[in-house]
């Protein structure tokens, strides 16, 4: 199933896609948009244009597992995306994204990515990390012997 991960941010929203076999996640770009409704519209258009069958929106929980203001914004984004897709079979889910931005920064540090390219890349890399974790979680949920 082709999945889209969304790492929502007020100014930049990272996107990542996986292949139909859910084997490989890759950065798919960054939406540079102010305003939740405009960002949601672009996410939905991107999903429809790319044959996405499921969307996972990162849920930035606090380290103690509680939900703060940022998590509530992301939940609202997920509800708005689902609302725009209600006439389709595309399912929208939330997935814990604690520390993904920190991990993305570490990856970019190791790759020595700096400057404007780094700023434009970190959100898409964070979305890719979310998607990889989500795909691993899905594989663990599968009954033994079942293929997707």
Image (spheres, rainbow, N blue to C red):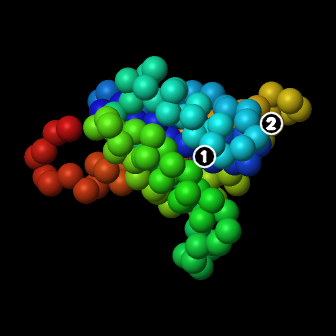
- The relative height of residue 46 versus residue 10 in the rendered view (above or below) is above
Closest to the camera, between mark 2 and mark 1, is 1
Q: Eyeballing the image, is 66 above or below 58?
A: below
Residue at screen point 72% across, 44% down:
35
Q: Mark 1 points at which residue?
A: 7
Q: Where is residue 31 in the image (x, y as percent from the top left)?
A: 67, 32
* Disc 2 and disc 1 in contact, CB within 8 angstroms: no
**Looking at the image, which residue sits at the far right?**
115
Q: How far apart are marks 2 and 1 (CA)?
A: 14 Å
Quadrant (top left/top right/bottom left/bottom right) for the N terminus: top left
Of 43 and 135, nearer the camera is: 43
User: Around disc 1, counting alpha carbons within 10 Å, would you say few (fewer than 14), some (14 to 19), or many (20 or more)?
Assistant: many
Q: Quadrant of residue 50?
A: top left
Q: At x 62% / y 59%, what residue is drawn? A: 73
Dot 1: what SS? strand
Q: How many labels does the image show?
A: 2
Quadrant assignment for the C terminus:
top left
- The percent position of residue 83, horizontal first and vertical second, equals 43, 46
Residue sitting nearer the eye, 138 or 59: 59
Which residue is depicted at the point 40% across and 39% down?
A: 85
Q: In which quarter of the image is residue 129?
A: top right
Closest to the observer: 42 or 58? 42
Q: In which quarter of the image is residue 40?
A: top right
Q: Within 10 angstroms of label 2, few (less than 14), some, or many (20 or more) residues? A: some
For label 2, the SS is: helix
Q: What residue sits right under mark 2 in the picture?
A: 119
Q: Where is residue 15 in the image (x, y as percent from the top left)?
A: 57, 35
Residue depicted at 63% across the width and 43% down the height: 37
Residue 118: assigned label: none
The residue lying furthest to the top in this view is 49
Picture coordinates of residue 58, whole percent (x, y): 54, 53
């Amino acid at each position: 199933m082709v999945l889209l991960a969304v790492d929502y941010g007020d100014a930049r929203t990272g996107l990542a896609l996986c292949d139909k076999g859910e084997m490989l996640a890759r950065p798919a770009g960054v939406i540079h948009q102010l305003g939740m409704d405009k960002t949601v519209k672009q996410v939905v258009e991107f999903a429809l244009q790319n044959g996405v069958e499921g969307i996972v929106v990162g849920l930035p929980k606090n380290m103690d597992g509680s939900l703060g203001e940022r998590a509530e914004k992301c939940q609202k984004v997920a509800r708005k995306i689902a609302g725009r897709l209600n006439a389709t079979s595309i399912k929208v889910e939330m997935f814990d994204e604690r520390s993904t931005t920190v991990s993305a920064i570490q990856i970019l540090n190791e790759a020595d990515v700096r400057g404007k390219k780094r700023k434009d890349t970190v959100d898409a890399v964070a979305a890719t990390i979310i998607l990889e974790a989500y795909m691993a979680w899905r594989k663990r949920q599968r009954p033994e012997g079942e293929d997707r």
